[in-house]
Image (cartoon, rainbow, N blue to C red):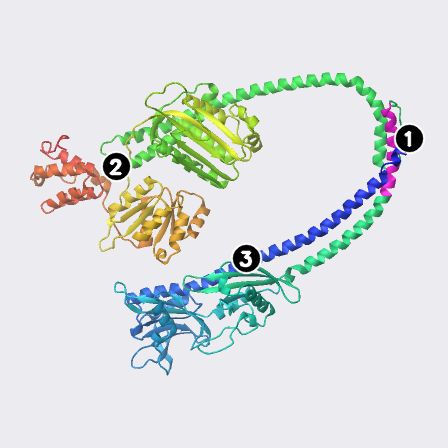
Amino acid sequence: MGVFNSRLGHKLPLQALLVVPFLLQLAGTTALIGYLSYRNSQRAVNHLALELRNELTARIQQEVSTYVESPFVINDLNAIALRQGDLDPSRAKGAYIFWKQSRSFPANNLIYCGVEDGSFMGLGQFRDNQGVHVLISKPSPQRFYHYYQIDEVGNRSSPVGSLDWEYDPRIRPWYQKAKRQQKPNWSNIYLDFDDQVPVLTASTPVYEEGSGRLLGVCATDLVPSLELNHFLSQLKVGKTGETFILSREGSLIASSTADEENLLIDAGEDIQLLPARDSQNPLVSATAHYLEQQFDDLRQIDQVQQLEFWLPGGDRQFAQVSPFRDEYGLDWLIVVAIPESDFMAEINANNRLTRWLSLGALVLAAGIGVLTSRWIARPILKLNQAAQAIAEGDLAQTVEVNGIAELETLAQSFNQMGHQLRDSFDTLEQRVQERTAELAESNRQLELAKEKAEVANEAKSTFIANMSHELRSPLNAVLGFSQLTLRSSSLPPDQRENVGIIYRSGEYLLTLINNILDISKIEAGKTTLNLKSFNLHRLLSDLEDMLYLRAESKDVLLTVTRSDDLPQYIQADEMKLRQVLINLLSNGIKFTQAGSVSLHVSTHPPSPTSLVLPAQTLPAATLPIYFEVRDTGVGIAPEELPHLFEAFTQTRAGKESQEGTGLGLAISRKFIHLMGGDIAVSSELGVGTAIAFYIQASLSEAAPLDLQPARRRVLGLAPGQPTYRILVVDDKEVNRRLLVKLLSPLGFEVREASNGLEGIEIWNDWEPHLIWMDMRMPVMDGYEATQRIKATTKGQATAVIALTASVLEEEKVVILSAGCDDFLRKPFHEQSIFDAIAKHLGVVFLYDESKLGSREQEPPADLHSPDLRDLPDAWKAALYTAALEADSAQVEALIAQVSVTHAALAQDLSQWSHQFRFDKILEWVEALPGSIATIPDAEQL
């Protein structure tokens, strides 16, 4: 015991070890909490002040933008009316136009136009509650300024007064500035001679089309002090914050303090605005002084400035200065100033309370810690002595502890330990045998579960195969009748193309069913290769369309690219290739949380993952096709790569996702091997995965493109209309070709572009009346193209209608907010296209009122009619040749030759020609009596 005590004396006592670290931790925690509380409060204040300034600045910019845009819109409308003669100040004509505009834009003080002969006409809203009056000044007999009342429909009525001095608009500053600059512009703020309020004028010169002669100037007056001051005063800027708008010279355009002080310091024609540094409001004045100190010239501020400064009393202030400019010369500064004290009062009180509570807790904890350490240390020393005795081999030790429940339990457990040690040695071997038996039983249960799973899997495969058969039977009828229709020699090209679309859609559904069936075939070991010719480019496009929404829902960029030399038509197993690509791309999207998934197809090996062709010689017509799928997902661990293609094996990411069965990659590799290729994988955790494979294919000839029948109810444009220009912007050639073929025969001029950038170039040069805009395209999508077009004045006159394959209703809101005038979903009906054109362009169509079905069944005239027997054989042969070559111009010329002698026949043949039913014309000529000898044979054609 003496030795034990001597050793303990050279080390720290247990009581000190319990108390000192606890006090140090508590003191450090208290100090850290206080420091973090102070820092977090500062950060919170800075962040809150920044968010509030940004929000207020955005609201002010939006309000000012809306406020200053309307005058130039009004001026443009009045310029059009002035050119067209609907508005004529010389004859005091068109006051109702101003009246309508004042009702639509009530914020404008005065709307008016002056012309070169000195005439003036306008409509003003009087601030003395006298309503709206028409203002007229003519060059003769005197240039007096006359006021007239206006009736309920906007027409000038009885006079209400006049000014006895001459008014000539041509010498007014707003007229001379617009004439001098030859473009729309803003005036400086000046005092209105009539209402004696500060006014800002937007003026636009109007020139005669063709000659360029100046007709006059249209202008609109705004009163910033009425609208902007009211808006700024209504904004809540903390408790004592202020907002104001400055000119570049430092004068107050508008301020939230306008109710407290006068923003004008002078009167007269050259009005002076109150400099912000002379404001009676301390915050506005201090902010202006600080800006002048920071920037020698306020014109240097060309971007948003976040500023902090202190008032003489020591209070910190937050300020944000944002430039506001428009294309007509307006150049202001929007300033938001907020005192820090608006946010810190409550935070400082909480910090003081936190510090006092922390200090009290520290003192109380120190006292409790000393008492607790003494109470705990005594029984622990007893346990320590007993433990030393057991370590020396004396297991017969007992310890008595009272007062602390946990230590009492510890003492009891300690007392039982000696007895249990001896019993444990005796029972250890028996326990090992029992665990071994349990493990064997567990393995047997696992084997049994595996056998049951295999039986269930086989039953699943059988069920899938049976259901596939039931689905393929009705689908076979769809495909069979589609092919039967395509064999018809009289099927027109447009009908053949649309029937072909039906046929390919059926084949795609059949492919999906075959994919499901192939899974069961692989499990049964009955997979075979099914070679056929197909369009590889269309397969890649279909896959991109199929997986686009899935990728977009995760904010993952999906791209599909191909090399320039990739053949379009190949012979391979399309079904298995589609299955492999869907599986690899779906895995990439599933395990990529952010970034991109890409597929590249080429006739050359990818890099850095390179695949080597088998050593055997390939047939001359065989071509290797290489595919590479890359993603920026979670990646695969190196130890998992060797087992990646084993059945029922999943990576860690696959198990965590709780999706899939571990069969996808195993099936894909079997398909690739069956198609004469191989597959390789490279991956890095946290970076992504690259999977490359190749297959052997042979080149194939393209099958004839079958077209679909279209119901041609619209025959063309009604006479007396201009030639409308329509631009089709779509990256898919088949979509562009559909609209070109639909609209060109009707009399529209149609051009096409394959992306948004090309569409903007054509729009800028060609100025179409309407644009059909696809929204998802490479290079530049339809959203950006529409925004660029609609951002210009010329673009406002062009109707832009969106065409999209999206079925999400919220997508429509996004598209319309981008600037599109209308919205149509793919696939569309041709009548929807015609209705949209009529809606936005006012087009009037000619419609076929006859029943096409009955007219197409019978020839246009009685073949045995005596009137038809005198048709020249040369004419019939020429008509036959022109119809055979689908030369509509030649057919119309030949019909015109007999229009006088055979009017009914010419009408019916013209109808077939307009409908491009040249097959009907061929059948009719062949059925004419005696025409067999006159029809040229193939050698002659």
The answer to whether the residue labelled 1 contacts the one labelled 2, judged by CB atoms less than 8 Å apart, is no
What label does residue 54 carry, if any? 3
Q: Residue 776: percent from the left, percent from the top? A: 40, 43
Q: Residues within 10 Å of mark 2 (few under 14, many from 20)?
A: some
Q: Is residue 10 magenta?
A: no
Identified by mark 2, the residue type is: Pro
Q: Is residue 337 left or right of residue 532?
A: right
At x 67%, y 19%, the residue is 439
Residue on which disc 1 sits: 3
Q: Residue 163: percent from the left, percent from the top? A: 38, 81
Identified by mark 3, the residue type is: Asn
Q: Earlier in the sequence, mark 2 or mark 3?
A: 3
Q: Is residue 225 visible?
A: yes
**Magenta region:** 371-392
Q: Is residue 601 left or right of residue 119?
A: right
Say which of 104 and 484 sits in front: 104
